[in-house]
Image: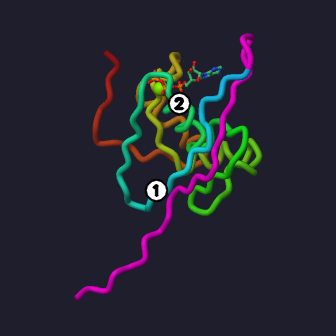
Amino acid sequence: MKELKPVKQAISASRLCKNYETSFGKVTVLDGVEFEVDEGGFTVLGGLSGSGKTTLLNIISGIDKPTSGKLLVYGENLTAKSEDFLSNFRCSNVGYVFQSYNLVSTLTVAENIAFPMEWLKKPAQPSKTVWKNS
Ligand SMILES: Nc1ncnc2c1ncn2[C@@H]1O[C@H](COP(=O)(O)OP(=O)(O)OP(=O)(O)O)[C@@H](O)[C@H]1O
Ligand SMILES: [Mg+2]
């Protein structure tokens, strides 16, 4: 039998909480969220509108920080990192399709895709596909 390899933990969240301060007072969106995702896993996050899916994804991807709790992504405790670290972390590791697209409207489709490569100072590989704006 083939030897089994230990599974690496990609994400580990413990006691994650997120509150928003609004003009109507404090809104608690995440209240002690705990979960783990193994490397290579495929995970679906479900819930009613307003239940906090985007809030949680923003925290996992380093866009936002929790009010309290701990989040490890490949061993990095993202809750303790600077904005500079998080910018580089997102650019190098995170692929995120936003609920609202957040594209730079003055750039073409190809330029929007290549833009993060400029941040990383890596030349974008020329594509065999020709992108055209409609
Ligand atoms: N910046 C903010 N300030 C105050 N409240 C916020 C903020 N962002 C989100 N919320 C509130 O947090 C709750 C969760 O919002 P979130 O966008 O995470 O939900 P969702 O599960 O992604 O919803 P949907 O399925 O509609 O996309 C909602 O009640 C929302 O109004
Ligand atoms: Mg959402």
| Sequence-earlier tag: 2 or 1 | 1
Residue 80 is inside the magenta segment:
no
**Residue 37 image label:** 1
Residue 72 at what x, y percent from top left? 61, 56
Identify the amino acid type marked 2: Gly
Residue 83 at what x, y percent from top left? 74, 41
**Residue 81 image label:** none
- Say left or right for 8 vs 127: right
Q: Which residue is more in the foreground, 90 or 7?
A: 7
**Quarter holding ligand 1:** top right
Dots 2, 1 in contact, CB < 8 A: no
- Say left or right for 77 vs 112: right
- Queried on whether the Cβ of the residue with tag 2 lies below 8 angstroms from ligand 1, the answer reads yes
Residue drawn at (68%, 56%), measured in percent from left and top? Answer: 77
Q: Which residue is mark 2?
A: 52
Vertical relation: 62 (above or below) 77: above
- In magenta, the rendered stretch is 1-25
Residue drawn at (72%, 11%), measured in percent from left and top? Answer: 24
